[in-house]
Image (cartoon, helix red, strand yellow):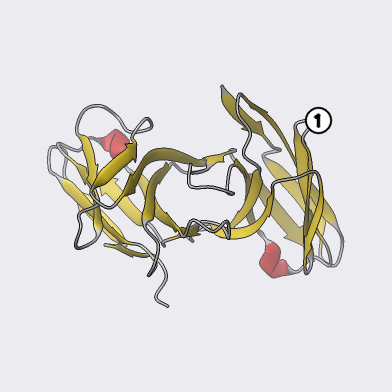
Amino acid sequence: NAGVMQNPRHLVRRRGQEARLRCSPMKGHSHVYWYRQLPEEGLKFMVYLQKENIIDESGMPKERFSAEFPKEGPSILRIQQVVRGDSAAYFCASYSGTGDGYTFGSGTRLTVV
Amino acid sequence: GQSLEQPSEVTAVEGAIVQINCTYQTSGFYGLSWYQQHDGGAPTFLSYNALDGLEETGRFSSFLSRSDSYGYLLLQELQMKDSASYFCARGGGGADGLTFGKGTHLIIQP
């Protein structure tokens, strides 16, 4: 069981570039969540997806950010025209639906220079 | 609204017991979860309380009182490897996701 796989582990982008973060949930998990964490802060919910559906995107900025979870392949969090304030750790979690906790990936540390 | 309050930092001695408190305000309550996160690491699930009372898992226990909007995580026989941040979170019993507190940094001294 490979767990929740996120890549890349570290990503450096210049201001104005695009960042693409990938997440493959645990095998058998159909619920995927993205969180953002700033240094010394808790995790802030961004978006909840199931296959081909966005269930709740109330935590995601309206501009520049988008997320998808296609029928095949990983979930993608896309940040267009990155700014320095986007620098953070982005964690993906998946859930089986059976109440045994959420499993987090190791995160992607995005640095915007 | 939804907010969870927990101390920002707690210091304890190796071998001792420590309690990390969490109070919450939420318009809808779906249980209280606890997660551990080491520096640079992923949050890992520790426990979940849907109902009032104590849940025990090895050295870790978690308590919930819904009438007091309060819970705590109890760590016994502290080890140096327990030095980490601990987050309480609303939710965990369903697919609605988690709302996290800001975390408690636990410092363990020899």
Q: Secondary structure at mark 1?
A: loop
Residue at image coords 77%, 45%: B72
Q: Is residue A105 above or below residue A88?
A: below
Image coordinates for residue A107, horizontal then vertical, percent: 38, 57
Residue B91 visible: yes
Q: In the orientation shown, which residue stands out farthest toward the right?
A: B16
Classify 10 Å Cα crowding around label 1: few (below 14), some (14-19), many (20 and above).
few
Image coordinates for residue B35, horizontal then vertical, percent: 61, 54
Residue at image coords 70%, 52%: B106
Q: In the orientation shown, which residue stands out farthest toward the front?
A: A98
Q: Amino acid at mark 1?
A: Ser
Which quarter of the figure is the N terminus of chain B placed in? Answer: top right
For mark 1, name the chain.
Answer: B
Which is more toward the observer, B91 or A107? B91
Q: Is residue A18 left or right of residue B34?
A: left
Q: Is residue A4 left or right of residue B82?
A: left
Q: Is residue A14 above or below residue A58?
A: below
Q: Is residue A101 above or below residue A89?
A: below
Asked where in the image residue B100 lies, by quadrant, the reply is top right
Which is more toward the observer, B3 or A48? A48
Image coordinates for residue B39, horizontal then vertical, percent: 53, 58
Which quarter of the figure is the C terminus of chain B placed in? Answer: bottom right
Asked where in the image residue A7 lies, by quadrant, the reply is bottom left
Which is more toward the observer, B110 or B3? B3
Residue at image coords 67%, 60%: B83
Which is more toward the observer, A99 or A5? A99
Residue A112 visible: no
Residue picked out by circle 1 = B67
Image coordinates for residue B41, horizontal then vertical, percent: 49, 61
